[in-house]
């Protein structure tokens, strides 16, 4: 029976105790235990080679993220915000070549946000309210990105180069382009890059509470889709 289970969804209950041991569920594809009161270590997914989705957000999971997470190339999405993980660096997501969504806000990560390499399928990268201190300066190869949120960290330095679009990128039949960026509540310095004027489909840009200087580039005023600045 356990080998035939492909989907578990028990989100938004009052479950307590340790997160479940799913090692016997070798055909499991999606696990959603979010918004409960679960404690204990982050689940080990060593034997869950078919897993494409993992939602653990809004619990009290602690400890490090196990190596089995980055050893699972089929993972498409990971939601793990609002847990009590050990402080430390974000795991190396360059090995997760199929990753499309990472939501890891308020997860006690620190240090540098790692390079995303040449990931061409990642659409959402949201890691607000951590203790990241730096960010890769060049994101132009991550052309599938639609949402980038690094708000409320302690990041210093210049704002990064972002993927520019004259047309939308088509991936998995979907038309994608960067639509929302949030760099607020950090310590970014320098100027707003003129190249951001090429973010043709950008709808929201939040740069509040930083140390930026200089004029807003006139190129930003030509972003016809921009609704919030």
Image (cartoon, rainbow, N blue to C red):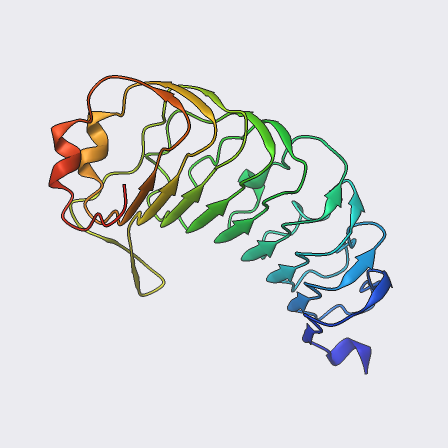
Judge left or right: residue 181 versus residue 74: left
Q: Residue at x 60, y 35 (%)?
A: 130
Res 179 seen here: yes
Location of residue 26 in the rendering, given as x and y in whole percent from the top left corner: 75, 68
Check the image and name the residue furthest to the front: 209
Q: Which residue does the image show at 50% across and 53% down from the upper left?
A: 101
Quick one: 224 or 3, which is closer to the camera?
A: 224
Q: Seen from this angle, which residue lies furthest bottom?
A: 1
The quadrant the N terminus occupies is bottom right
Q: Nearer the viewer, residue 48 or 56?
A: 56
Side (left or right) of 112 relative to 86: left
Could you tell whether 87 is left or right of 208 in the image? right
In the displayed structure, 140 sits above or below 156; it is: below
Quadrant position of residue 181: top left
Q: Is residue 98 visible?
A: no
What percent of the width, then of the height, locates residue 102? 54, 49
**Residue 116 image offset from top left, x and y in percent:** 48, 36
Q: Write the residue at 36% across / 25% down.
A: 159
Left or right position of 142 against 94: left
């Amino acid at each position: 029976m356990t080998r035939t289970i492909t989907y578990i969804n028990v989100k938004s209950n009052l479950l307590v105790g340790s997160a479940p041991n799913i090692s016997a569920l070798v055909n499991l594809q999606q696990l959603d235990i979010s918004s409960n009161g679960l404690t204990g270590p982050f689940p080990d997914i060593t034997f869950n080679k078919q897993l494409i989705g993992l939602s653990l957000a809004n619990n009290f999971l602690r400890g490090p993220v196990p190596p089995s997470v980055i050893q699972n190339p089929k993972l498409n999405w990971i939601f793990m915000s609002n847990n009590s993980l050990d402080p430390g660096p974000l795991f190396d997501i360059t090995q997760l070549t199929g990753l499309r969504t990472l939501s890891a806000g308020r997860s006690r990560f620190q240090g540098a946000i790692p390079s995303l390499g040449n990931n061409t399928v990642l659409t959402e990268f949201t890691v607000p309210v951590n203790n990241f201190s730096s960010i890769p300066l060049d994101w132009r190869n991550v052309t599938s990105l639609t949402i980038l949120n690094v708000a409320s960290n302690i990041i210093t330095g210049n704002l990064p180069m972002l993927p520019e679009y004259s047309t939308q990128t088509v991936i998995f039949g979907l038309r994608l382009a960067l639509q929302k960026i949030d760099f607020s509540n950090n310590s970014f310095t320098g100027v707003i890059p003129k190249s951001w004027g090429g973010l043709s489909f950008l709808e929201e840009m939040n740069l509040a509470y930083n140390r930026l200087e200089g004029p807003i580039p006139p190129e930003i005023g030509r972003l016809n889709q921009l609704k919030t600045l």
